[in-house]
Amino acid sequence: MDERGFEEDTGPGQQPLEKEHSTELLPQSGAGSLRDVYMPNAAYQPLDSQQSLLREVTAVSSCSLRRGGCWSGGGPHQQHSRRWLFFLLAGALVGLAVIASSSLHRDPGTYEGRTQLWSLFPMWGAGTETTTTTTTETRTTSTATTTITTTNTGTTTTTTSTTTSSTITETSTTVSSTTTTTSTTTTTSPPCWPRESPDGGKQVILGVSYAPVPLLPAGERIPNDDFMAEGMDPYWGPPGKEGKGRRDLRIMRALGANTVRLYGNDPAKSHQRFLREADELELDVIAGLSDYPYIQMKGSCLSTDFDCFDQIKEQYVMNLQGGFLRNETTYHPRLRTVILMNEPDLKLLGDTSNFCRALVSAFDAVIEAEKEQGVKGVAPNFTVAFSFGLCPRCTHLGHTPGLGQMYALREAMRDPKSVDYTPRNDLWTLYRTRFVNAINTANPAFDVNSLFIQPYDQHFQGTPVFIGEYHSPEYFDQKGDLEAIVKLVRDPSNLLLGIAFFEFQVRYDKGGAEMSFGMFGLDRELEITEAVIGWENYPTHCLTAVEAKSGGGKCGKLEKDQDYVSDNKWGFAMDHIISPEMCCSKCREFDECKAFTWVEDAGLPGPCKSQCWVKGGEPVRKDKKVGVVSGLRAPAEGEVQTSKKKLYVHEVLANAFGGEGVNLSDVCPVTTTTMTSTTSRTTVTETQTSSRTTTSI
């Protein structure tokens, strides 16, 4: 029996468990999620660099005072009192200068205090900065004048006495020379720098991941998945002169989103129209580079030993020319971030040096492409979106989701030659000024905070991070979870910039568990128009609302302070389950589970000490035990559940983001339907007189 009153390896009301019943905590498929994992956080006490510098100044001043006896001039008492006064004044002036200097020129790689984390380019400013240092040294030899008077008295006559006085004056010449040395240091700003928040705080990302693949059967593929490209406006564009466009971007904006995150990228296509539509709606854009040059095309990075410089540079030059630049040399202002690769740790396998070399060379390539095109001014940040998986092959922080991968990449940026790459640019400086981190996860907010954000803040001060894919569709309280993650984003004391909700539309083509994500489904009957993708026509389906899942609401009555005792041997415990409702939701994930018991305080480490026991049989008896809550997988016979109003995912998101929301009738701007003779699909024709074609979206 342990200190909690339970038998070893035995849960409340449970037979002793076999060792194979213990759950291993592994990354989930898809977004690389990590389920039911808890990593206790290590203590962290950052060093304030300003205090460190002041301590050094104080030490130097004290040392100088101790050496005061070596100076010359003046009497002993006057000499020491003046030196003390001089050094006290000098020390104060130096201290003030250090504070002023450190507040004006912060190093983004050091901890500067939580209120100063969000200026993303503190090392650089626009134009040329000139610093002039003037040193004046004056050496004076004191002037001394000595007058010597010699008097000679001689008697020439008895009646006349003459006194002759001779005065000799010796004057030492006063020499005063002043030497002035002027040194001028010129620091030229880099041609590109990331935009700055107007108030110096977080530039919060409330985004939506967007890949509106129009395929309904699982396993089908489309020839091009660049939905940012021109020609894809039947999905994201507004109704034009021909009444086409599903208005996806306008729906996002109405839900409160300020950013859209994309995936596929065809550099041969123009992206100007998409960026123009985003600009009109005041939506920032996070664009992604395709996997094609990394792992798919002939001559990919896999064939060049993971050196991706040539492949990525060629692609990015085309991107710059195809819409990323608003004019010949200036980025489009809505392009906030460019993702160099999505989840490379799941695609570039082998030693960590493989994905590090690929990403370091890719970062070098996009910078070189900017230089070749003469790009200047405010520019997007670059990032890599890692999975939420552990990294056993990482030498440091590999036990923490995502951090091992980020740490390995940071060290490769610091020293590219450590991964056998010779850069063309100063990647370490560029990493500190134009790089942010990103991660994808299907874990709820509580997990994200304890497993990732807290340890991230300890190890990556100065480098913000955002979640490129966020949604935990099986979490029992979707509304509460999205509110919690947005609250975490708005907290100025951490480095989390924001999230991109995963995702706008259900991906039927992926099938399986991947269809759990998405806030809108596709109507199998109603279509708005068609889009030409490759050389084929694909439908623009009307959208349908997806109901927010809530496993807890399907469970039976919860009994407080009652431990359900089962004689079935199947069962096991899951740690850090934050509520009885979530425990019920976990029970429903297993066909064998018939009942569950939630332990409020199981003595586990960390802020969440709760534990959930799932059990393979209904209770044979109920024991009173304070601090536990038990229930059945399904409502008991004859038990009437309280009816609840349906809650849709897009409503939950609008509530969390603070958007006005949309009506269900607004997500499909159609009025009448007609059957076409060429296909079996239903096509929609819009009329100008319909009230449904004029919405607030």
Image (cartoon, rainbow, N blue to C red):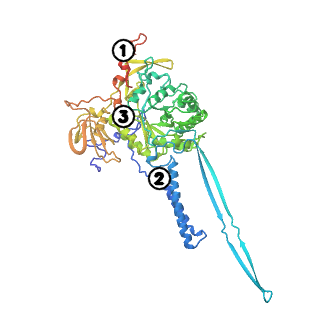
Mark found first going from the N terminus, 3 or 1: 3
Give the SS element for disc 2: loop
Give the SS element for disc 3: loop
Mark found first going from the N terminus, 1 or 2: 2
Q: Tag count in the figure?
A: 3
Q: Is residue 5 above or below residue 362?
A: below
Amino acid type assigned to the residue bearing label 2 in the image: Asp
Who is closer to the viewer here, 154 or 147?
154
Mark 1–mark 2 contact, CB under 8 Å? no
Q: Position of residue 543 (x, y in %)?
A: 38, 23
Amino acid type assigned to the residue bearing label 3 in the image: Gly
Q: Residue furthest right?
A: 157
Q: Which class describes the residues within 10 Å of circle 3: few (<14), some (14-19), or many (20+)?
A: some
Mark found first going from the N terminus, 3 or 2: 2
Q: Position of residue 589 (x, y in %)?
A: 32, 33
Who is closer to the viewer here, 499 or 238?
238
The CA distance from mark 3 to mark 2 is 36 Å
**Can residue 393 be seen?**
no
| Left or right of 270 in this view: 454 | left
| Residue at mark 1 | 672
**Can residue 335 be seen?**
yes
Q: Quadrant of residue 32?
A: top left
Q: Which class describes the residues within 10 Å of circle 1: few (<14), some (14-19), or many (20+)?
A: few
Q: Which mark is residue 48?
A: 2
| Residue at mark 3 | 658
Q: Quadrant of residue 679?
A: top left
